[in-house]
Amino acid sequence: MKNFRHYRSSKGWIVLLATVVGLSYGGYTFIHRAVTSQVYVTNCGIQDYKPTTIIKFCADAGVGIGAIKWNSWNTDGATGEGTYQINDCSPSCVEGKQHYANVTIELSKSKIINGKPTLTYVKVITKDGKNLPLSDSPTDSWPMELAG
C-alpha cells in the first residue's frame, strides 16, 4: 500500500490540484461576470430582469404587455414579442372588457439606477400593422417607472 508522501509527489496530485484551482477560479469569474453584467428594466417601481409582463399603468394594470418572450437583451436595448392588453373600462374598469394585440417590443434608454444598468423606455408595435385596440396608431410607448 502506498503512503500519502508517494501520492503527494506524483503527477496525478498536481493535476488534481491544478484542476480544482482552475475550476474554482473559472466558476468565480463566470458568476462574477454574470452578476455584474446583467441588465434590468424598471417595471412598476421594481428593477426586474427579463420580465414576462410589463405594466404601463401600475395603479390598475389597465394597459400592459404579457406573455413576453425576449429575442435580445443587453445594455443597448432589448427586443421581444408579446401580447398588448388594454381594458376599455366600460362601464367601469372593474367590469371592462380586455382587448388584445400581438406586438413586438423594444426597450431602450439605458441608465444606471441603484448601481445597475437599467432599460427605462418601452415601445410596442403591432405585428400585423393594424392599430392597437382602442387606438388610432399601431404603436404605443412610455417611460418606465423609476427612470431616474
Image: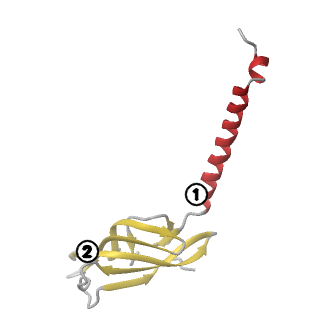
Q: Seen from this angle, which residue lies furthest front?
A: 11
Which amino acid, mark 1? Ala
Residue sitting at x 53%, y 77%: 146
Q: Which residue is mark 2?
A: 94
Point out the image quarter for the N terminus. top right
Q: Which mark is residue 61?
A: none
Tell me if label 1 and label 2 are in contact, CB under 8 Å. Answer: no
Residue situated in front as seen by the camera: 125 or 66: 125
How packed mark 1 is, by other alpha carbons closer than 10 Å (few <14, some 14-19, many 20 or more), is: few
Q: Is residue 39 left or right of residue 50?
A: right
Question: In terms of image quadrants, where is residue 79?
Answer: bottom left
Please state the horizontal and vertical placement of residue 46, each as a whole percent of the image. Answer: 50, 68
Would residue 84 be found to the left or right of residue 1 on screen?
left
Label 1 or label 2, whichever lies nearer to me, is: 1
Residue 56 image-quadrant placement? bottom left
The location of residue 4, given as percent across then percent down, is: 76, 17
Residue at 20% x, 76% y: name it: 97
Question: Which residue bears the numbered disc 1?
Answer: 34
Color scheme of the displayed model: secondary structure
Q: What element does badge 1 sit on?
A: helix
User: For the residue labelled by badge 2, is the local secondary structure a helix, a strand or a loop?
Assistant: loop
Q: Residue at x 75, y 13 (%)?
A: 3
Please give left or right for residue 113 compared with residue 87 in the image. Answer: right
